[in-house]
Image (cartoon, grey):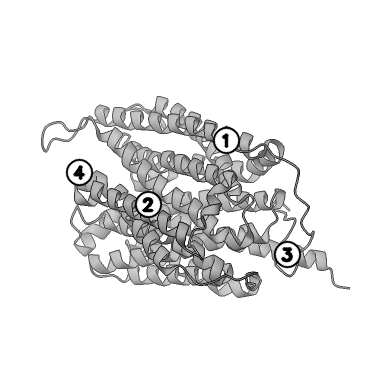
Amino acid sequence: MVDTASGTQRRTGLMLALLAFAQFIVAVDYNIVFVALPEMGSALGFTTQSLQWVVSAYAVAFGGFLLFGGRAVDRLGARRLFILGLTIFGLSCLLGGFAESPALLITARAIQGFGAALLTPATLTLIHTRFAEGAPRNKALALWGACGSGGLAAGALLGGVLTDAWGWEWVLFILVPLALLAAVLSPGILAADERPAGDQGGFDAFGAILATVGSSLLVLGLVSGPEAGWGSLRGAGSIVAGVVILAIFTLVENKTKNPLVPMRLFGNRSLVTAILIILVFQSALGGAYYIFTNYVQGVLGYDALQAGLAFIPLTIISMAASLKLAGALLGKWGPKGTLFFGMAVNGVGMIVLAVAMSTNASFWALVPGLIVWGIGGGVTFPAMFACAASGVAPQEAGIASALASTSQQIGGAAGLALLVAVATAGLAGDAGAAPAVADVADGLRTAMWIGGAASVIGGLLAFTLKSPGASPAPAPVAEGADGRVDEVRING
């Protein structure tokens, strides 16, 4: 007799492991390139101004194509786009590793961003559609979020180790086998995509162009402003153009029969609240990572590897909070209480860290703030994406995930630009003179304070959520024809 329950549980575990691994890959890439930037610049002949495009090209393509990627997931299938996104991501890393000119490396990074823009909504859609809403999905998102935290730490560490040992190329080459292996394993682990029910109509090509151009210009302006100047064409000019095009996109979508982004989604209070919370949370988080990295290197004198190691307490606590605390709090308090708690604790941790950021602080003086910050971030991350998927129809899970992820990218770029501006506001000094370390520390500390306060205040957005009503009907207890599962065990 075949133990079908055991077989279903094993397949569910493999599916979740694959989806979490995909998030790990994307998260590794977030940090792994930063440490290698100086060597990339000297090896390929980048100018000081052009080197930032190794990071910006990826960010612009990722943020710009997310809405396109999300709708493509809904129309073409999450498994197909998951495999395609992994393949594009992996091959573009290979191309980038072999680059011998700045133009080729920047192009490869943009293609990599496009692959991530397909992969991210596909991953979230597979979680949202293959795991029933409630405890099963919350547990799946908890593991997904924990692997994201682990990837951030692994990226920081691997970036330093690989660059020192074998050169900058290996921060890209290391991602090639990871992404392609996941793509090869996917058909045997993920159930085939089902044809969406109902008439799906045509694809909104004009809306896709407007959304991609508008989002790309907005992200471009946010990432370019600190370097090019906010009054420049590439700074404020790109932001204004992006906002105008996105406004036109909204008008067009209201008149389109088969819109890229159905406007009725904005009637889902959980989704809208999640988008706003993600925007605030990522604004604080993206800027805070940059601030802390610059603090330990620029003020405390850590090298690249030591800076990566400094993130380990934050990462371990964040992973533990995602796995052990987020799902339990969602089950006990619901999204409203969990998101407020997570955002508030996240902000308090950043403020505690800011208090300890003196010019001669020991690492151990920073650990309490890192621990509190990690608890808040670990709880918030899976909770806000669980909230974003609440009440969304399966055939629109891709675009809902893309809206949440676009908010994440825009928030990260905006937060980084704002907090960097705060941190450097008082460092003008004499032309050509390096600012005093005490002044640098003061600026970074002030920026961390502001980021923490924004997170605490942003947590109040959670109270706009509706109070939970009657529980929905339970989903099937085992995997059915649609590949959906009602229960998943993470801790055995």
Which one is earlier in the sequence, the residue at label 2 or at label 4? 4
Label 4–label 1 contact, CB within 8 A: no
Q: In front: mark 4 or mark 3? A: 4
- Reading the image, the residue beneath label 3 is 10
Q: How many labels does the image show?
A: 4
Residue with the most extreme front position: 255
Q: In front: mark 2 or mark 3? A: 2
Residue 230 placement, left or right of 21:
left
Q: Give the spatial CA distance, label 2 vs label 4.
A: 22 Å
Q: Give the spatial CA distance, label 1 vs label 2.
A: 25 Å
156 over 25 or under it: above or below: above
- Reading the image, the residue beneath label 2 is 247
Q: In front: mark 4 or mark 1? A: 1
Q: Residues within 10 Å of mark 3 (few under 14, many from 20)?
A: some
Specify the label residue 231 is tagged with: 4
Relative image position of residue 313 (x, y in whole percent)? 51, 39
Which one is earlier in the sequence, the residue at label 4 or at label 1? 4
- The answer to whether residue 450 of the structure is visible from this angle is yes
Residue with the most extreme top position: 355
- Quarter of the N terminus within the rendering: bottom right
Residue with the most extreme left position: 431
Q: In front: mark 1 or mark 2? A: 2
Residue 149 placement, left or right of 450:
right
Q: Which residue is drawn at 61% across and 75% down?
A: 187
